[in-house]
Amino acid sequence: MNMRLKTAGLVALAATLPAFADIKINDSLTLSGYVAGAYEYQKVKTLPATDSLFDGTKDTPSADAALLAFTGNFKPVTGVLSLYYVPNLPKNELSVLDAYVTYDVGSGFSVTGGKFLSYLGYEAFHTASMTQITYGLVTIGTLGAIPTYHSGVRLDYGDKDVSYGFALVDSVFSPNGFAKGDGELKHNAGFEAFFKYTAMADLTLWAGAAYDTKGGFQTNSVTVLDFWAEYKLTKEATVAAEFSTKDGGEFAKGHTWLAYLNYAFDPKFSTVFRISGESLSGKTKTVGNNAIQYTVCPGVKLTDNLTVRTEITYYDYKDNVYRKGLDKTLYGVQAVFKF
């Protein structure tokens, strides 16, 4: 989810949309977006004949994606509408992602209403804002600790040193996929909050929390705490770490983590090294359900608009009873054009 952007005011807008160079249509309307295409191949250590989860299909559906975002700026009001397309999804290949209005209250505060992206997560939601093809286990593991889009209202503040926000939404998580919440407040509600500290040079500290009340599709209340830090060691090297813990009942309780290094060998060529892990507790703890993911992803910026990435990711399930023997290696190539 895209929380890496440093903002001063209108934090909601910058946190949701990728950092692209907008195309100006007129004085009030701009257009931005991206198109991404990828090839992925998975090699599984032991493939049961009846197992369809590892049949060569893409591990990362959003590796192929297209976004078209319209931003209307009528100060102090900003409106955003984005259309998102992912081919070959079981349903809703074309989705409306962002659909919100932000009012700049002044003094760094803003109020947003509509459908917007969750605060939580170090890794960006949008493919063009990623530095690798796949997501870490913090985002897409069995726990599913990082939510995506939902509808509601939020209050945000931002300046050069700190930013924070609070949101009331229809649901933090959703039975309807990544593009929307559950669409109601009658049976349950969701709450999110975050705080980001950027006063120290080259260092970003972030802490966030989310809570879904019990009711409707949620058979248990769900609590998520998420913490990440990013530090620019040198001009070439950026390191980051994230830890997330989730309590969603006996079968969705545990923690996830990742460690991240992005090294730029020159302005056009860089490589990401990432280790991510997941450990479930609750009733699953008695049988074991752990996983570790190792990623290396070189990327080349061919132009300001076009980037090509290659990736090798290994999934280790040796301590996972449900997937024991299904260790796999993923190979991927991706091109991303942004505008």
Image (tube, helix red, strand yellow):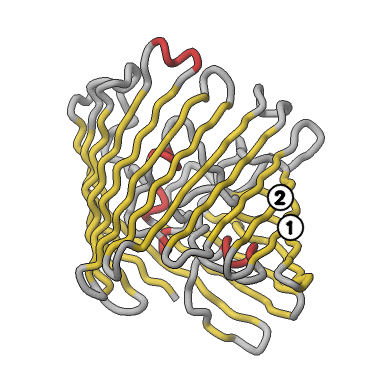
Query: Looking at the picture, how far across and down is residue 105, in whole percent?
Result: 78, 70
Q: Which residue is mark 2?
A: 167
Cβ–Cβ under 8 Å for marks 1 and 2: yes
Where residue 13 sits, quadrant-wise, is: bottom right
Q: Is residue 204 left or right of residue 172?
A: left
Determine the residue positioned at 58% across, 21% down: 249
Graded by Cα atoms within 10 Å as few (under 14), some (14 to 19) or many (20 or more), the crowding at tag 1 reads: many
Determine the residue positioned at 34% across, 31% down: 53
Query: Looking at the picture, how far across and down is residue 118, in whole percent?
Result: 60, 50
Instruction: Name the foreground residue: 160 vs 148.
Output: 160
- Dot 1 or dot 2: first in sequence order is 1
Q: Which mark is residue 155?
A: 1
Determine the residue positioned at 65% across, 56% down: 164
- Residue type at mark 2 is Ala
Instruction: Name the foreground residue: 252 vs 198.
Output: 198
Q: Is residue 164 left or right of residue 280?
A: right
Where residue 42 sits, quadrant-wise, is: top left
Disc 1/disc 2 C-alpha distance (Å):
6 Å
- Residue type at mark 1 is Leu
